[in-house]
């Protein structure tokens, strides 16, 4: 009994990580979720479901040999064995609601609470937990940054929210109009995803991720300057259902890499804006509207250099 | 080329600060200093919209006035400086050039509504002057937050860094200094 307790105490879940539903249900002893609870596209979930299905077939044809195999139930079956008041809803497991018991036998596809949560979460941005200043530009922690100055934030349930980073919104300055992609449009990482207008100038912006657009921030139609005021929260642009999430994330800057990237971009911006005189400055953060300051300079050159389009 | 750095007050600058700059350069870089006849307040560089002075215009003026027999030429001013894309600058320098300029305006604790602190002010002046001098010798910004060549975007960055080059920047400084002294007889 003592050894079992010790084993249980060893199952530490690191801060910021969440248990996989297979661990939560007690089918496997230790597995963390690495797919934002998007079980429908999770390779691990598919593999486990197959394994259980194979075992059940084997149980019919070779009952003695199959009985040795421990993997006899799916996580849903295991959860359903619990008393009704201990069947945690998946939004409780992921921490998005404080307490919610599943009333629908984990059939999320037909659950009205799941539909309500999906709607609400697509419309409401999650708060940014920590921010940092790097070379005078704000970075939201735990966001992934694309070299074309957009960010991608995977959220529980599998969606990825997309927006402009602080560098881009300061570079372009007061946004005139944002032409967002349509819902259902297929986007590719590193290809043009949307465009921005300012004083008759157009800047195309690259998508940070592959996916299908699931939701767009309609508030930006009337208030494009939301992307200036709160580029990591209420000024988000659109949400996608990703198609190659893990592969795409490897191509984005995260934490220390993002900080180094912004430092390099700041140096590059300074050099480009002062290329008439080879100088270096020890100085403050960027002005709020760089476009206004460099008016008369070659706009296309700045867009090509920093938005990579 | 002589091992002499010329310090030029632009507008009204406290004598004690100029002497402190001279002592720091002599102590940290083993170079001698002399003072240039002061320049007037740089009205030509004043931007009425920003209520600040364009540091690039002042730097160009320093370039025109730079004595031929000096290794480097440092302008020191009390006015608030900027470059177009930044809200302000503590200093601006030519990379591998002769001229640089330092603003004292945002180094005073009083600027941040704090009590006057002459020691803190002199430490900030020393770090900013060394930083700009480093640029004129060709050293670019360093990623070590403690190195004097770290780029300060806030005064807290200046307070955190040390008034000395990190080992890498120190080697670079010596190498560039030797090169400068050898190149120009």
Image (tube, rainbow, N blue to C red):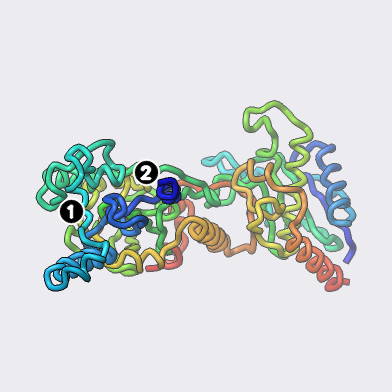
Q: In this rendering, is residue B59 above or below A126?
A: below
Q: Which residue occupies 34% across, 50% down? A: A175
Query: Is the Cβ of the residue at disc 1 closer than 8 Å to that at disc 2?
Result: no
Q: Position of residue A160 (x, y in %)?
A: 29, 56
In this figure, which residue is indicated by the disc labeled 1? A77
| Same chain, labels 1 and 2 | yes
Could you say which quadrant of the image residue A158 lies in?
A: bottom left
Q: CA distance from mark 1 to mark 2?
A: 44 Å
Local crowd at mark 2 within 10 Å, few (<14), some, or many (≥20)?
some
- Mark 1 secondary-structure assignment: helix
Q: Which residue occupies 28% across, 42% down? A: A96
B161 with respect to B4 (left or right):
left
Instruction: Evaluate whether residue A120 shows in this view.
Output: no
**Farthest residue, direction top:** B115
Instruction: Evaluate whether residue B82 shows in this view.
Output: yes
In this figure, which residue is indicated by the disc labeled 2? A230
**Farthest residue, direction front:** A64
Q: Position of residue A168 (x, y in %)?
A: 41, 55
B184 with respect to A107 (left or right):
right
Q: Which residue occupies 23% across, 55% down? A: A75
A218 with respect to B118 (left or right):
left
């Amino acid at each position: 009994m003592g050894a079992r307790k010790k084993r249980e105490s060893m199952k530490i879940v690191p801060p910021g990580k969440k248990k996989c539903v297979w661990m939560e249900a007690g089918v496997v002893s230790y597995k963390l979720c690495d797919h934002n609870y998007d079980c429908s596209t999770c390779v691990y979930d598919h593999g486990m479901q197959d394994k259980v299905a194979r075992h059940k077939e084997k149980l019919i044809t070779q009952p003695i040999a199959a009985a040795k195999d421990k993997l006899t139930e799916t996580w849903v079956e295991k959860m359903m064995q619990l008393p009704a008041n201990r069947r945690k809803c998946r939004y409780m497991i992921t921490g998005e609601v404080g307490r919610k018991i599943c009333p629908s036998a984990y059939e999320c596809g037909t659950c009205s609470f799941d539909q309500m949560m999906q709607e609400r979460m697509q419309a409401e941005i999650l708060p940014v937990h920590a921010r940092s200043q790097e070379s005078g530009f704000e970075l939201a922690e735990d966001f992934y940054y694309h070299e074309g100055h957009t960010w991608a934030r995977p959220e529980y349930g599998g969606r990825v929210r997309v927006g402009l980073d602080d560098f881009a919104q300061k570079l372009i300055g007061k946004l005139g109009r944002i032409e967002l992609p349509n819902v259902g449009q297929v986007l590719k990482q590193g290809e043009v995803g949307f465009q921005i207008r300012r004083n008759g100038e157009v800047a195309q912006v690259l998508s940070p991720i592959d996916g299908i657009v699931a939701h767009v921030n309609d508030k930006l139609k009337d208030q494009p300057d939301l992307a200036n005021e709160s580029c990591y929260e209420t000024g988000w642009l659109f949400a996608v259902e990703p198609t190659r999430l893990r592969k795409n994330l490897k191509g984005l800057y995260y934490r220390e890499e993002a900080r180094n990237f912004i430092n390099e971009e700041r140096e590059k911006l300074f050099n480009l804006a002062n290329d008439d005189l080879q100088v270096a400055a020890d100085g403050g953060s960027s002005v709020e509207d760089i476009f206004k300051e460099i008016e008369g300079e070659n706009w296309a050159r700045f867009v090509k250099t920093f938005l990579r389009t | 080329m002589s091992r002499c750095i010329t310090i030029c007050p632009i507008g009204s600058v406290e004598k004690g600060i100029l002497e402190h700059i001279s002592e720091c350069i002599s102590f940290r870089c083993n170079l001698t200093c002399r003072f240039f006849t002061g320049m007037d307040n740089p009205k030509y560089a004043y931007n009425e919209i920003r209520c600040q002075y364009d540091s690039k215009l002042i730097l160009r003026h320093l370039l025109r006035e730079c004595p031929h027999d000096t290794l480097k030429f440092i302008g020191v001013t009390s006015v608030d400086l900027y470059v177009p894309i930044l809200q302000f600058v503590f200093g601006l320098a030519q990379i591998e050039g002769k001229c640089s300029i330092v603003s004292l305006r945002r180094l005073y604790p009083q600027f941040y509504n704090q009590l006057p602190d002459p020691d803190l002010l002199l430490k900030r002046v020393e770090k900013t002057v060394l930083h700009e001098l480093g640029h004129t010798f060709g050293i670019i910004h360093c990623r070590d937050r403690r190195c004097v060549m770290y780029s300060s975007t806030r005064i807290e960055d200046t307070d955190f860094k040390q008034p000395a080059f990190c080992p890498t920047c120190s080697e670079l400084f010596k190498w560039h200094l030797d090169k400068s002294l050898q190149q120009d007889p």
